[in-house]
Amino acid sequence: MRLEVVDDADWHDEAYRANDRGLFYARQIVGQVVSLAAALLGLVGTAGVLGVLHPALLPLLLLSVLPVGAAAVRTARARFHSFKRWNILQRRVRVFSWLLLERDAAAELRSDTAQGALLEEHHRLTTRIAEEDTRLGVSSAGLTLAGRAVGGIGTGITYSALGAMLIAGWLPLAAGAGAVLAIQSAQSTLTRLVDVSHMVYEHAMWVDDLLAFQERCRALQPRRSGLPAPETVKTITLDDVSFTYPDKDTPALNGISMTLHAGQTVAFVGVNGSGKSTCARLLAGLYEPQDGGTVRWDGVDVLDMDAESLQARVGCVLQDPVRFPFSALANLTVSRGTLTEADPQRALDAARASGAEQVIAGLPGRWEALLSKRFRGGQELSAGQWAKVAVARGLYKNAPVLLLDEPTASMDPRAEHAVYEAVLRDNPRPDQITVLISHRLASVVACDRIFVFDAGRITESGTHQELMDLDGEYASMFTLQAAGYRAEAEEAA
């Protein structure tokens, strides 16, 4: 699934609905179809008996059942559309429920005394759902009552017609008792047929909704065809690249152009929301350029490449890394798409460079330690320790492009300095493009090129000294941060 899809709330609602109802009814409908076939066979038998007694009884018989069937169909449609309306509420209730139980949120919920507020919101949402259920129940009861009332009138008409036939001599008196039994049997069979049919009809709507969601998901899959991404890359070129997130009017990127070369370490800086991370995700093939812009690897448009192979060539280290509930080793190897196969030397080198080696050495079981308190025997890491594991994960991937998006935000100053020294300065790779996104401008001073983002555009670019000489936005931000550090040092002295 393409990354931008997870930003679409409508898609999440559809996914929840498909999982909660579609999959369940897809299993149920098979048995219901079998029951429907059995009911149809039974109806053929009783209809044959009535046809022999008198053909006029057959259409009269439908008068008692069709109104009930019509009411059942309308009730099924009302129930289907009702659930689609409060599906959003149901999903929010599920999120609130898990938030109240989630271990990572437990401390903050209690320190903020927020549990009561969440429970109130949970109660408000469930009350709205109950009101919708009540409204649907009253409506369904009214429809069912009306259907049965009209059906009862139809039954009366049927027996009245039967009596008239007997009086007029259209039907032998000796056959009257048999006709009554046949009508009762046929009504019972028809009623069962209507009940099963309306269940099949309702289940079919959910299955159709599931199939429509699956079809939409197929259309949202990353490209599985095209050229495989190259094992190495010399230049990556962005030409007039733009990107707008779903349901947003303002573009996150607006006409970005740049060229990155192997062996370079470049930095993206700027205020929050300026487009730095979006640009990095375009480089990683997680997003695709819009409005005619292009991203080229050694002159080849990434839209002509297999998307998954492109993503495999980029190592990403994010500010809030995923805390996989795997072993310490699997938390590194997952970057190469495996939990069970590992290169021991590569894992050790990555852990040493990131500072994760000491973290892992202190764990019971070391590399085999389970990094999650959700499971028995699992270990808990601090945010800074997880950051080191995440950097090691990115290094283990050994990709030709390495993206570091605020990777050391949770680390202490010494650990942060050690990571930058090891990753950016001590072991430069002539075959790798390294992109660093950081708000701490002291960490980007040694980068080969710095791009300054503002409102989705690149406003300045150059080396640290060139940008300082320019005396623009970068110089202003750097001077402001440096002044803050000097003030702290003077206060400490």
Image (cartoon, rainbow, N blue to C red):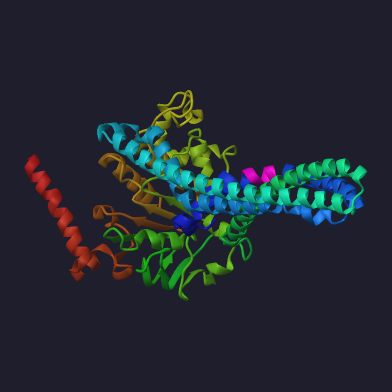
- In this picture, residue 83 sits left or right of residue 33: left
Vertical position of residue 400 compared to residue 322: above or below: below
25 magenta-colored = yes
What is the magenta segment's predominant secondary structure?
A: helix
Q: Work out which residue is located at the far front of the displayed protein and give it.
A: 167
Count of numbered labels shown in the rendering: 0
The vertical placement of 316 against 274, above or below, is: above
Q: Is residue 492 left or right of residue 163?
A: left
Q: Find residue 159 and report its horizontal and vertical position in percent.
A: 77, 48
Residue at (36, 48) in percent of width and height:
319
Q: Work out which quarter of the rendered image holds the C terminus and state it.
A: top left
Picture quadrant where residue 441 is located: bottom left
- Horizontal placement of 65 versus 92: left or right? right
Locate residue 271, reporting x and y percent: 26, 60
Residue 192 location, quadrant = top right
Q: Position of residue 424 (x, y in %)?
A: 36, 52
Q: Which quarter of the image is occupied by the N terminus? A: bottom right
Does 449 lie within the magenta span? Answer: no
Residue 346 seen by the camera: no
Q: Residue at x 64, y 45 (%)?
A: 25
Q: Is residue 137 visible?
A: yes
Taking depth in this image into account, of 278 and 473 the one nearest to the observer is 278
The residue at the point 46 percent across, 47 percent down is 132
How far from the left and from the top, in percent, is residue 436? 36, 56
Viewer-nearest residue: 63 or 88 = 63
Residue drawn at 37 percent across, 41 percent down: 387
The magenta-colored residue range is 24-29
